[in-house]
Image (spheres, rainbow, N blue to C red):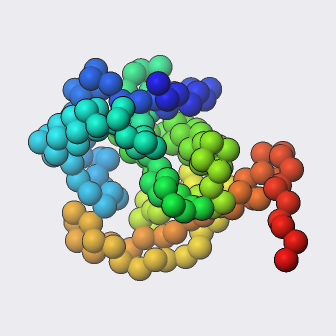
């Protein structure tokens, strides 16, 4: 089982026990204020059931994970771009009753550690709606730099602007007190 452990959150594989809490996210209006997609009960059941059935057989396994706090299921997160690239994009979705507790910041830092250390990525990226000031703050507080607007993206609410944030492995190493990987001579 995949597990990343922080001080207050645990990132782990989905299990059958997570179906109910994951499906319940479809009723949490706050989550979808700034998201690209909106899940429904039916899509949540289908997505999670599909993942639970196929994930153990895939190589490499998908990287969508449960965010678990002391209260249990707090949300989910993921990394995409795992294969064939030196960069990956990550994101998280927390239940609205879990906001303001530092879980998004801790999840971001765990995903960065996994992306750079575990997956060996050279660049980690995330996007945010510019009106989502809490997410912008989490990304900046975690050391990512705003690279600017990527323009409008299609969302369930219609076209919305998105900001791109990124961090290099060198910046991550320096931020975490590790020696950066030496660049090869050119």
**Residue 141, position as x, y percentages in the image:** 64, 52
Of 134 and 146, the residue lying toward us? 146
Could you tell me which residue is drawn at 83 percent across and 46 percent down?
A: 178
**Residue 128, position as x, y percentages in the image:** 45, 62
- Number of marks: 0
Of 55 and 140, the residue lying toward us? 55
Could you tell me which residue is drawn at 64 percent across and 65 percent down?
A: 145
Could you tell me which residue is drawn at 29 percent across and 37 percent down?
A: 54
**Residue 176, position as x, y percentages in the image:** 78, 45
| Res 107 quadrant in image | top right
- Is 128 above or below relative to 100? below
Of 108 and 136, the residue lying toward us? 108
- Is 175 above or below relative to 49? below
**Residue 146, position as x, y percentages in the image:** 59, 69
Left or right position of 131 against 166: left
Quadrant that contains the C terminus:
bottom right
- Is 58 above or below relative to 1? below
Q: Is residue 112 visible?
A: no
| Res 114 quadrant in image | top right
Left or right position of 54 against 118: left
Q: Is residue 166 visible?
A: yes
Left or right position of 78 against 55: right
Could you tell me which residue is drawn at 32 percent across and 47 percent down?
A: 31
């Amino acid at each position: 089982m995949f597990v990343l452990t922080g001080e207050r959150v645990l990132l782990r594989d989905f299990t059958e026990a997570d179906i109910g809490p994951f499906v319940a996210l479809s009723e949490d209006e706050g989550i979808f204020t700034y998201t690209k997609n909106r899940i429904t009960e039916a899509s949540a059941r289908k997505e999670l059931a599909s993942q639970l059935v196929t994930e153990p057989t895939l190589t490499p396994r998908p990287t969508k994970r449960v965010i678990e706090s002391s209260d249990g299921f707090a949300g989910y997160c993921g990394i995409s771009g795992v294969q064939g690239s030196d960069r990956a994009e990550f994101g998280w979705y927390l239940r609205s009753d879990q906001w303001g507790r530092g879980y998004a910041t801790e999840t971001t830092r765990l995903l960065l550690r996994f992306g750079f250390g575990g997956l060996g990525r050279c660049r980690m990226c995330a996007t945010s709606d510019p009106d989502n000031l809490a997410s912008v703050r989490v990304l900046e507080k975690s050391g990512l730099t705003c690279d600017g607007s990527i323009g409008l993206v299609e969302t369930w609410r219609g076209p919305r602007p998105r900001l791109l944030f990124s961090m290099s492995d060198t910046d991550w190493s320096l931020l975490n007190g590790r020696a950066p990987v030496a660049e090869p001579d050119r």
